[in-house]
């Protein structure tokens, strides 16, 4: 348990290097040095990952791995926005509890389930500090708890552990613990809606087919980086035929802004392919890259796709609202050392649908990394292209 004395001591020494504190070893008698270090690291992480927790000096923070695996405040708020006010939620894989706490701000009641007793103690402490009296904490195996509790929930939320016993990252749902696919009959029996959090690297089409009852897929980017893929499943009527209507919602949130759009699988507009390169070049944000609505991007923003496997777009007019990176073309160039060095000595190298990766190409061209220019290596109408561009900065 993280005691109040540890939290207070850490607060008084916030900003200090926890490694140096551990090495010094001169803490007051009775204080666990590792737990003090955990608090210092958590306090340092909170302003960017959980700003609302950073404001409270009495919050307890868990071990580093649990903090790293926890949802950010932004991602947790998005998940909580899916829950209706007054509904009930069972969070079967509670962890640090950020998702449970966010659910509790909207839901009538949240049941937090976690097998790690230290995490349960921290969750109970933080719920009390934040005045979230509508959270019940249960320490134990989530499958056994769900079988024994004999209750029906509006929502069940599950975020299976995505590391094996050696700490290696896992992606497929069947490889994670608990195995959501194996648990589907029980989960469907106990809730109206099931929300499954998965790795941003997961194969969405394969997962939808295996889950079989998915209504919506939410691809959530935070600060332009894809962080979560969420499968929202209907527990009731749909057969696992893969023929149901699936809405894909792409979301990108950052400080001061949010972008979102959606499409239906199987109903997308075919892409319009560019005949020539035009003045502006566009790289979709990470949520769109994961979702892959290539034709819809053309329809939404009036741009043209470079090639079937080149997920870059072009237009003569600057589309200011385009969600992603925007570049202005300066010239085409041959991608050899002599041609490139005659024009630029320092540049950012971007590779999209090109035979070599960016690091290899940079070495081949002999250019230093960085600066204001971008060399984009790509493919247009089956032909390899080298493009010298400048970044057009948006207000995001």
Image (cartoon, rainbow, N blue to C red):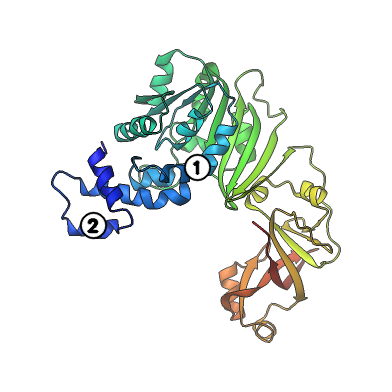
Relative height, residue 286 to residue 77 (above, below): below
Residue ID at (43%, 44%): 69
Task: Please name whichever residue, 316 or 163, is drawn nearer the observer in this view of the structure.
Answer: 316
Characterize the local packing of mark 1: few (<14), some (14-19) or many (20 or more) Cα atoms within 10 angstroms: many
Task: Determine the residue positioned at 54% across, 38% down.
Answer: 77
Image side of residue 65 versus residue 253, left or right: left
**Residue 198 visible in the shown view:** no
Q: Is residue 121 visible?
A: yes
- Please tell me which residue lies in front, 46 or 63: 46
Residue 73 is labelled as 1
Marking on residue 99: none
How much space separates mark 1 and mark 2, taking CA atoms? 28 Å
Using a 10 Å C-alpha cutoff, classify the residue at mark 2 as few (fewer than 14 neighbours), some (14 to 19) or many (20 or more).
Answer: some
SS state under label 2:
helix
Which picture quadrant has residue 248? top right
Quadrant location, the N terminus: top left
Where does label 2 land, which residue? Answer: 21
Residue 209: % across, % down: 63, 33
The answer to whether 113 is drawn above or below residue 389 in the figure is above
In this rendering, the answer to whether 141 lies above or below 58 is above
Residue 336: x percent and y percent? 67, 80
The residue positioned farthest toward the right in the image shown = 275
> In x, y percent, where is residue 142?
40, 25
Residue at 49%, 34% (x, y): give it. Answer: 102
- 214, 324: nearer the viewer: 324
Report helix, strand or loop for mark 1: helix
Q: Is residue 377 left or right of residue 100?
A: right
């Amino acid at each position: 348990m993280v005691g109040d004395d540890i939290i207070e001591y850490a607060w008084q020494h916030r900003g200090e290097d926890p490694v140096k504190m551990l090495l010094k070893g001169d803490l007051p008698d009775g204080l666990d040095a590792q737990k003090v270090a955990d608090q210092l690291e958590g306090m340092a992480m909170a302003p960017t990952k959980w700003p609302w927790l950073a404001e409270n000096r009495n919050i307890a923070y868990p071990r580093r791995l649990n903090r790293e695996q926890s949802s950010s405040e932004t991602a947790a708020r998005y998940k909580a926005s899916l829950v209706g006010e007054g509904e009930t939620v069972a969070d079967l894989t509670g962890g640090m509890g950020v998702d449970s706490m966010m659910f509790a701000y909207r839901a009538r009641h949240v049941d937090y389930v976690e097998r790690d007793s230290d995490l349960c103690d921290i969750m109970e402490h933080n719920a009390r500090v934040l005045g979230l009296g509508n959270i019940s904490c249960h320490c134990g195996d989530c499958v056994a708890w769900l079988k024994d509790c004999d209750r029906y929930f509006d929502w069940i939320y599950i975020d299976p552990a995505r590391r094996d016993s050696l700490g290696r990252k896992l992606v497929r749902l069947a490889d994670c613990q608990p195995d959501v696919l194996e648990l589907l009959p029980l989960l469907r029996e106990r809730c109206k809606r099931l929300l499954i959090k998965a790795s941003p690297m997961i194969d969405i089409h394969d997962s939808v087919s295996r889950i079989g009852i998915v209504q919506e897929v939410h691809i959530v980017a935070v600060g332009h980086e894809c962080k979560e893929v969420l499968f929202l499943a209907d527990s009731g009527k749909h057969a696992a035929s893969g023929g149901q209507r699936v809405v894909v919602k792409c979301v990108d949130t950052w400080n001061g802004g949010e972008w979102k759009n959606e499409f239906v699988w199987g109903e997308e507009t075919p892409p319009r392919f560019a005949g020539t390169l035009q003045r502006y070049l566009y790289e979709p944000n990470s949520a769109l890259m994961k979702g892959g609505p290539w034709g819809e991007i053309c329809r939404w923003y009036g741009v043209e796709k470079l090639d079937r496997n080149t997920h870059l777009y072009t237009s003569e007019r600057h589309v200011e609202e385009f969600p992603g990176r925007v570049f202005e073309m300066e010239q085409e160039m041959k991608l050899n050392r002599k041609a490139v060095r005659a024009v630029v000595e320092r540049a950012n190298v971007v590779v999209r649908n090109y035979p070599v990766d960016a690091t290899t190409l940079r070495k081949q061209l002999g250019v230093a990394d960085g600066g204001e220019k971008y060399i984009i290596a790509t493919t247009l109408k089956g032909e390899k292209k080298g493009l010298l561009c400048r970044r057009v900065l948006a207000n995001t």
